[in-house]
Amino acid sequence: MRSCKHPKLLVLLVTLFGIALDQLTKLIVDRTMALGESIPLFEGVLHITYIRNRGAAFGMLADNRWVFLTVSTVVIVVLAAFLALTKMRDPLALTALSMILSGGIGTMIDRLALGYVIDFIDFRLINFAVFNGADSFVCVGAALFLLATLLDLRRQP
């Protein structure tokens, strides 16, 4: 098993990078596009579409802001505490959990500052919900953590 020499630094850098990328892309969309505007990158496949999401992931349960803030705060605090206290040194698992943390924090920033989340990635090929970088980090991070867990189980006798 590979071991990370500086696990806390990896966690910090991945988390900060994820938050910065998420917030920067949302800021660019908010400053350069009109609400509801859609720009095709690949017509019928991938568009940049500016929407405001008042629900949970992918617009579910709209207008329950305080529920999301409460649940998100608990998850963020628990995950951050785990990452700060863990002896884990697997770089894939640490990266995965840091991606999930950055996505949660990115969404929390929007909910606290704006009262909604800016979504803009519009993958139309499969008629999927419009989402953002934070959603992507959470989903990819979860998939990578599952992969890290499976690889770890495979290495154990």
Image: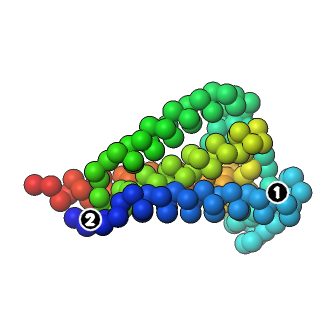
Is 66 drawn above or below residue 150 in the view shown? above
Tell me if residue 50 can be seen.
yes
Q: Residue at x 85, y 60 (%)?
A: 31
Quarter of the figure with residue 79: top left
Circle 2 Cα neighbour tier, 10 Å, few/some/many (<14 / 14–19 / ≥20)? few
| Position in image of residue 25 (x %, y %) | 71, 62
- The residue labelled by disc 2 is 3
Judged left or right of residue 135, residue 7 is left
What amino acid is at disc 2?
Ser
What amino acid is at disc 1?
Asp
Q: Secondary structure at mark 1?
A: helix
Front-lying residue, 116 or 3: 3
- The residue labelled by disc 1 is 30
Q: Residue furthest left?
A: 157
Q: In the rendered structure, find residue 122 and report the number of the disc placed on it.
A: none
Is 19 drawn above or below residue 43 in the view shown? above
Q: Residue at x 49, y 38 (%)?
A: 77
